[in-house]
Image: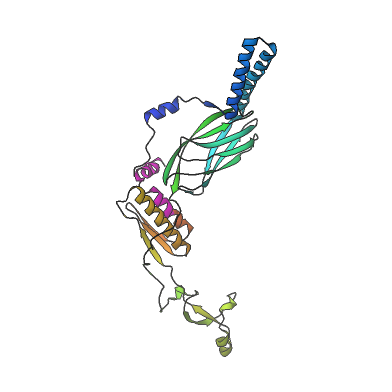
Amino acid sequence: MKAPARPSFKARLRAFFRPPRTLSVTKTGRTYLVVTFGVGLGALNTGNNLLYLLLGLLLSMVVVSGVLSERCLRDLTVRRVGADAAFAREPFAYRWAVSRKAGHGFALTLSEDLSPLTGTGKLGHLPAGKEHIVRADLAAPHRGPVRLSGVRVTTTWPLGLFAKTRVFSLEGTLLVYPRRGYACKEPGPAERGPQGEAGSPRHLDGTGDMAGLRELAVNEDARRIHWLKSAAMGRLLKVEREREERRIWKLALETGLTGDALERRCEEVAAQAHQLLDAGNEVGLQLPERTLRPAAGASQERRILQALAWVGYEDADADSREAA
């Protein structure tokens, strides 16, 4: 799988000459224009002054709609807040921050421009001087880095006849994790199991086998007191138990996988890592290009997901590191 292709010269040229605003007619607007055209034909054929007056009113509403929609899109400031985690082929929460210097904005719709991400966020009213967070449920068709070129802001204010759009140029990258699913295969045996019968003092106070007794210290848990031995010795004795070490798994992604086989294997490894880490174990990852050392916790799961998302896109990863 290759890295995402850079925009071609033709695409960059088209973006350069793209007008600052684009206008499209809504379904209501098409009906309105048809009625206006019919009134105009009637006025020309009959010469009725009332029809001319009505035609002028209809055309003036088109002008008013254009002026007010332009005021909604002027003085806007947009920035990406992003997503906490984006998984392929399932909705994820995505956010933009919108503000304006003066005036009010109405009926705003935000989306990513020229991007495979689907979904929009909507904002009914945007007052001046306040930054609002617009949330949308987006979806990505596949895992990997998604290049973002701009944010599209559209308004149908005030009459819903036309949809005027302004594109804010904002370069960025969204890393999409493998789709969350289930693992068909077992992860295999752990590299290291419990500590064993002969415990170390550094691995006590757990829930394993009994390792010995010692006097209860100040502010220690009284539930560990061995009452029978304490009564015999005349002082409070605490039971010490061995603490089992976390088991360690090293998951591996086979080399030579491409296409759907690679996608399915990445999803399977991600599911195995989630199950093992959720049980409190340590998990590492062996990839064709890099290795992740075993560790535990939610941060390790995020590192594994990031590494799996970049598999097959190593060239894009190198470019992003050089740019950083």
Single out the residue that lies furthest toward the right: 50
Is residue 199 shown in magenta?
no
Eyeballing the image, is 41 above or below 293?
above
> Image quarter for residue 173?
top left
Stretch in magenta:
303-323
The location of residue 111, given as percent across then percent down, is 52, 37
Magenta stretch, main secondary structure, is helix
Residue at the spot x=44%, y=44% of the render?
A: 141
Quadrant (top left/top right/bottom left/bottom right) for the C terminus? top left
Single out the residue that lies furthest toward the left: 256
Quadrant (top left/top right/bottom left/bottom right) for the N terminus? top left
The location of residue 258, given as percent across then percent down, is 33, 48
State the residue in front, 211 or 260: 260
Single out the residue that lies furthest toward the bottom: 232
Eyeballing the image, is 255 above or below 42?
below
Single out the residue that lies furthest toward the top: 47
